[in-house]
Structures are given as C-alpha cells and as structure tokens.
C-alpha cells in the first residue's frame, strides 16, 4: 500500500510539471527547451516539498512512539515493583507456614494421647453394649421358656380344677392351647422388653373380639385427605371398625388396648391391610396418585410370626408398595427397639413409605424423618395454630411445612373442622388437610369388597379364561368405584366440572 501511494504521488507531480510546461509553451510563447526547463524545475520543487513533508510526519510519528514507549516502560516498572512486593509478602507467608509445619509434629504428638484415650473409652463402651445386648437376649429367651412352662403347667392343671368330674365311660377332652395364646405370650414378653406394656382386660371383651374376627365382621372405613386449597383427594386413611353380632360398632378406643393385650391386634392389622390393598389396586387404575394410609400397631412388629407375615404380604404385593403408607404414632417412632427398626428397614427396602401421627410436640428433625422413610407427618391443626409458646419447640409452626418439604416429607393438618382453620392453615402454607370439614370416615360397603374378592378367586380358579378377563375386570372396577362414590369416599364432581 505504501508503494502504490508513492507511485501515485510521483505520477501526480510529473503530470503537474508537464501541465506547467505545456501551459508556458502554448500561452506565454516560450520555446520548447525553456518550457522543459521550467517543467523540470517545478517537478524538482514538488519532489523536495514531498520529501520534507514526509520527514516531518516521520519525526512526529517517532516522537509519539517514543512517548508511548516511555509510558509502557513506566507501567512495566510499576508492575515489576508490585511483583517484588508480592514476592516479599509471599516469602513472609511461606516462612510462617514453614514455622507452623515445624511445630505441627509436636502438636500432633500432644493430641495423639487424648485421641488414644477416647478410642479406648469408646471400645470399652462398645464392649459393654455388646454384653448388655447379649444379657438382654438371654433374658428374653429365659422369659419365653418360663412363659411356655407356665402355659404347660396351666394346661396340665386345668382338668384338676374342673368343678365336676366326668363319668368314667366318657373320655375327658384335654384342654387345647391355641397358637394365638402362644403368640400372645411371646408378644407380651418382647413388648415388655421394648417398653410396651399392655394392661390386661376382661376375658369377655377378648372373646367378643375373637368371635368378631372369626365371623369376619370387621368393617373398613375410609376418610379422605385433601390438598389445600383445591381440596382434591390425595390420600385415604383406612380405619377398622369391629361390628358385633347385634350390629354395635366398636371403635379403636374400645377394642385396641384389649386386642393388643390378647395378641389379636396382628390379625386386625393384617385384615385391614389386606382390604386396603384390594381397594388400592382398584383405585390406582383410575388415579395413580392415590395412596392409602394404614395404621399398624407396634405389637405387630414385635411378634416374629406377624412381622414375617407383614413382610411377605408387602413382598407379594410389590406393585402396591408405593400406594400403601404404614402409619405409627410419634411415641412409637421414638421408642422403637432393634427389632422394630430392623423390620422398618426391611419394609423400606421393599418400597414401603411411612407416616407419623398422634404428634404431641414439634421436637423433630426433618432429615432424620426422611432417613427413616417417613414421608407423611400428621399434626393436629390445633397444635399448629394455637401453640402458647412456639419458642419452646424446635420448629416454628409457620416454617414447619416448607422445612419438611425440603426433605421430601409432606405435612398433613388433621382434625380440621372449620373454614377459619383452613384459612389459617393456608397462611402457614400447609398443603394437605384431613377432618370432618372435608368428609367424615365412611364405610366401604361389603358388596364392593366382595366383588373384588370374588373376582380374584374366579381368576385363580379359571386361569384358562384369561382372554375374557379384562371385560369382567372393568365391570368389577366400575362396580367398586360406583359403590365407593355412593358412600362419598371418592370426590364428587362439582357443577363446573372440577372435583371436590
């Protein structure tokens, strides 16, 4: 580009000089040599002017470059000085680190004896714990043996205490010890060792409960748990009611303690869980987000037979594990021993989720709840809204819902009975509610469960007719859903098309 510019300037100067010569020759009457000399002189003058101008521009450019170089040198000197200061500071820090490293072995030597002593104490504590567990197991074995001996002695002594001896011609029937009595005794021993002590109740109530169970007169009630504020059904809580021969309903407060004392609670829990599973299998075909909460007694986890029966039931109904939620009171979660915790871990490995109810205080750690498999926590609405001194608890009620949700645990406000309570719960950002305001517990009709049981038995008896089964299954599903809807268990459609 520089060469092209120089050639262009030279061409212009030659053109100007030739033009001056031609003008002098034609206009002013100069002859050819004179006009040529004048043109050469003009060209020389133009060349000198161009050379001087270039020299001036070159000097100015060099001056600017020298100035920029001076500023760059000054900046470089400042950076070198800053680097020198940083190096000095770094050297000081390195020296300080070296001094600390030199003294570290001495400090470690002084700390090691204390660590060694603490580890020795921990080893002693672990050894004592192992001895205590061994003694505990030995005590349980001795108590079981003593209980079996007492039952045997009672069995042998029963004929002697009879009021009237039987005739010689009639053989005497030996008293029969049912397996349920052995289970009862074993459950009492293990329960007592784990802190659960059930009182003894009169035998007539025990006989009544046994007769009700043998006659299969246990009814299943469902109470919905709805979302707030939409009030869409998200869970159902399954409740068991025992119905005597005269039609009287026994509430859990009437028979629960007696059943636990008599060792019959495992049968009631298994019956309720079986019916809840039957209903859950049908409801899941309509709504995959529905779950059923079943209350389980801690005595069911204590007995070996009922515990294994529960595990086998969940294993056989693996597809329903995520829909069935097993519920225990807060006091049970806090007092669980090794046996119950092992059972909880086994059920959790099968995909079962858990719930906690009968909450008396808010002293709870959300991370610990999530680690134990608890996904639902039911707190009475009154406890959330009418705490006299929230500072006495670990968690403020207004922050409880969000804090639990961070660890995958949902808060359910139970015993909701007024719209004002719902408004207050929404201010606390509670997302689920349960109570008579939404719906009371309603029975599932026996015909609905009978249809489910009959369909299952038919499918087991006639495996060759499986191609025709879908139509029958759909009909049974429709009957079950219709029966439940009649009892207001399922949400009813509103006039605008939404669901209650």
Image: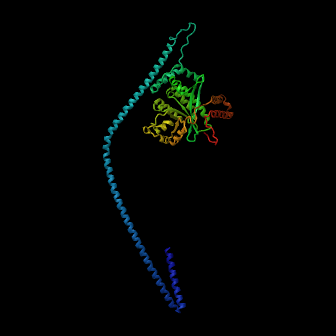
The quadrant of the image that shows the C terminus is: top right
In this view, the residue farthest toward the top is: 168
Query: Is residue 379 positioned above or below 135 on the image?
Result: below
Question: Residue 455 placed where, x, y %?
Answer: 65, 30
The residue sitting at 33% across, 52% down in the picture is 94
Residue 374 visible at all: no
Locate residue 383, reporting x and y percent. Answer: 48, 36
Q: Is residue 43 above or below residue 209?
A: below
Q: Which colour scheme is used?
A: rainbow
Report the front residue among 268 and 373. 268
Residue 74 location, x and y as percent? 37, 66
Q: Position of residue 310 (x, y in %)?
A: 54, 29
Can residue 385 be seen from the camera position used here? Answer: yes
Q: Nearer the viewer, residue 16 or 257?
A: 257
101 shown above or below 358: below
* In the displayed structure image, the side of residue 457 where residue 358 appears, left or right: left
Q: Is residue 500 left or right of residue 365?
A: right
The picture quadrant where one finds residue 267 is top right
Q: Which of 244 and 66 is in front in this view?
A: 244
């Amino acid at each position: 580009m520089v060469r092209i510019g120089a050639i262009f300037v030279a061409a212009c100067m030659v053109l100007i000089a030739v033009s001056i010569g031609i003008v002098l020759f034609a206009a002013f009457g100069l002859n050819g040599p004179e006009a040529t000399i004048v043109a050469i002189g003009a060209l020389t003058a133009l060349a000198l002017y161009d050379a001087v101008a270039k020299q001036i521009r070159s000097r100015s450019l060099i001056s600017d470059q020298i100035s920029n170089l001076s500023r760059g040198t000054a900046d470089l000197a400042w950076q070198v000085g800053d680097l020198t200061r940083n190096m000095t500071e770094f050297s000081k820090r390195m020296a300080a680190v070296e001094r600390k490293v030199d003294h570290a072995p001495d400090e470690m030597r002084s700390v090691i004896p204390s660590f060694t002593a603490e580890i020795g104490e921990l080893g002693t504590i672990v050894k004592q714990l192992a001895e205590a567990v061994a003694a505990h197991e030995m005590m349980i074995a001795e108590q079981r043996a003593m209980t079996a001996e007492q039952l045997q002695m009672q069995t042998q002594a029963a004929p002697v205490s009879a009021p009237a001896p039987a005739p010689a011609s009639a053989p005497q029937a030996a008293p029969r010890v049912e397996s349920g009595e052995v289970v009862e005794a074993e459950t009492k021993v293990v329960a007592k060792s784990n802190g659960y002590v059930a009182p003894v109740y009169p035998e007539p109530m025990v006989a009544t409960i046994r007769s009700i169970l043998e006659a299969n007169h246990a009814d299943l009630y469902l109470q919905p748990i709805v979302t707030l504020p939409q009030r869409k059904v998200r869970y159902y809580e399954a409740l068991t009611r025992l119905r005597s021969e005269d039609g009287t309903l026994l509430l859990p407060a009437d028979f629960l303690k007696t059943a636990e004392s008599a060792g019959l609670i495992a049968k009631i829990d298994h019956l309720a869980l079986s019916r809840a599973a039957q209903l859950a299998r049908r409801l899941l075909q309509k709504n995959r987000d529905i779950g059923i909460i079943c209350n389980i007694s801690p005595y069911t986890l204590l007995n070996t037979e009922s515990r294994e029966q529960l595990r086998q039931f969940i294993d056989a109904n693996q597809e329903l594990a995520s829909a069935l939620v097993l519920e225990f009171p807060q006091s049970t979660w806090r007092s669980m021993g090794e046996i119950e915790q092992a059972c909880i871990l086994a059920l959790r490995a099968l995909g079962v989720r858990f719930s906690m109810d009968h909450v008396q205080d808010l002293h709870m750690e959300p991370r610990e709840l999530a680690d134990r498999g608890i996904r639902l926590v039911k707190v009475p609405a009154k406890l959330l809204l009418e705490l006299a001194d929230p500072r006495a608890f670990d968690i403020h009620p207004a922050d409880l819902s969000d804090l639990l949700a961070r660890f995958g645990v949902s808060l359910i406000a139970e015993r909701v009975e007024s719209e004002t309570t719902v408004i207050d719960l929404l201010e606390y950002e509670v997302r689920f509610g349960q109570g008579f305001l939404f719906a009371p517990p309603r029975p599932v009709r026996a015909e609905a469960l009978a249809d489910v049981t009959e369909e299952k038995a038919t499918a087991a008896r006639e495996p060759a007719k499986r191609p025709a089964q879908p139509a029958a299954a759909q009909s049974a599903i429709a009957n079950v859903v219709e029966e439940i809807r009649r009892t207001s268990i399922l949400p009813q459609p509103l006039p605008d098309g939404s669901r209650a």
